Amino acid sequence: MSRTVAVVGATGAVGQEMRRLLETREFPCDDVVFVASERSRGKRLPFRGREVEVRALTEPDVFDGIDLALFSAGGSTSREHAPRAVAAGAVVVDNSSAWRMDPDVPLVVSEVNPEALDDLRKGIVANPNCTTMAAMLPLKALHDAFGLRGFTATSFQAAGGAGQKGIDELAAQVPVLHEHLDLLREDGAAAAKLVEPSVHAKTLAYNVVPLLGTEGDNGYTDEEMKLQNESRKILGLPDLAVSPTCVRVPVVVGHAIAIRAVFEHRVTAADAISSLERFPNLVVDHAPTPLEWAGRDEVAVGRVRVDLVDDHVLNFFVVGDNLLKGAALNTVQIGELLVERGVC
């Protein structure tokens, strides 16, 4: 059958990666449609040796003839336009937060719960938050081996998690503060005031910021609650005990998470590492860092240690590229699974 794929948000950072992955992974499609905002209408983007003209999302017939629509254009855009695409006959894979907790929409990590794709009652599949995504691969591997009861997660999330504007703000701050290294040591509060953050909660250069997202009434941010709620849905563990803290760090790309996981059964480091090594697209690396794993498709896990006081607890460190596996790659992988299942 012929197959046409649309990339919505094609000119954004994640959209660019989606376009690249459709090409490099030789995604089975006969045609593509690149969709973006009105200001990008008419731009020409390369794909498989030709140029494709960008169409505006506001065009009434933009989803006509589309079989699969990959969205990465923000939550409000997805809420408005994903149903349009479905009504026109497409299956939607959405990278925003708009549909993740909808009980009628599967929330899928391709290696973890592909069976959730069997129920597409709304014609939409949700892609998880990029931090949740990285954590799911090792947690699923270990859950299957030892029975996961809960976990405490402290994330170290890159500036790029806030998009290009987050990277730009960090890049602009670094040279300013670098000119005042003595002040960083002698009066850090004064150094922080040399720049005016607008994307991140506080000055990020030469710093870490333990406030990421919007605080709720319980004191946790929406970013932290995603770690709890999405993990429960993906793993099918509605009572999973999750204690999250999300931190922004001065890294360009790549999220890391320190995890303390509690299991039903006694765990050994050797058995844990063996389970992790067998899991698809998960690589055991003794001390993985976001810098060294930026640009790589796999999730890395390291520093695997049995807890010092409880042999039902494992401590480990996870790293994943938030633009790739955390966003664009998983979206394309879900598309590949939908094609394999004959859904689109």
Image (cartoon, rainbow, N blue to C red):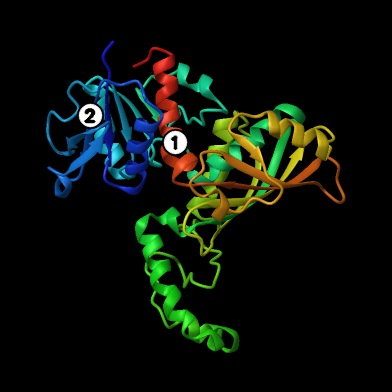
Q: Point out which mark residue 329 bears.
A: 1
Quadrant of residue 142 within the rendered picture: top right
Query: Going from the N terminus, do you reach mark 2 or mark 1 first?
Result: 2
Three-letter code, disc 1: Leu
Task: Measure how far apart labels 2 and 1 are at the Cα level.
Answer: 24 Å
Which residue corresponds to the image point at 71% horizontal and 48% vertical from the top-left? 286
Q: Secondary structure at mark 2?
A: helix
Quadrant where the C terminus lies? top left
Q: Position of residue 306 (x, y in %)?
A: 82, 45
Q: Position of residue 204 (x, y in %)?
A: 48, 69
Q: Is residue 71 visible?
A: yes
Quadrant of residue 71 within the rendered picture: top left
Q: Point out which mark residue 25 bears.
A: none
Front residue of 1 and 48:
48
Number of other residues with Cα within 10 Å of mark 2, as a class: few under 14, some 14 to 19, many 20 or more? some
Which residue corresponds to the image point at 86% horizontal and 42% vertical from the top-left? 311
Left or right relative to 174: residue 277: right
Callout 2 touching callout 1 (CB < 8 Å): no
Q: Point out which mark residue 84 bears.
A: 2
Three-letter code, disc 2: Arg
Which residue corresponds to the image point at 28% horizontal and 10% vertical from the top-left? 1
Q: Position of residue 323 (x, y in %)?
A: 44, 46
Q: Is residue 101 visible?
A: no
Left or right relative to 13: residue 235: right
Number of other residues with Cα within 10 Å of mark 1, as a class: few under 14, some 14 to 19, many 20 or more? many
Which residue corresponds to the image point at 48% horizontal and 42% vertical from the top-left? 326
Quadrant of residue 96 within the rendered picture: top left
Q: Secondary structure at mark 1?
A: helix
Location of residue 230 with respect to 26 vertically, above or below: below
Front residue of 134 and 78:
134
Location of residue 218 with respect to 318 vertically, above or below: below
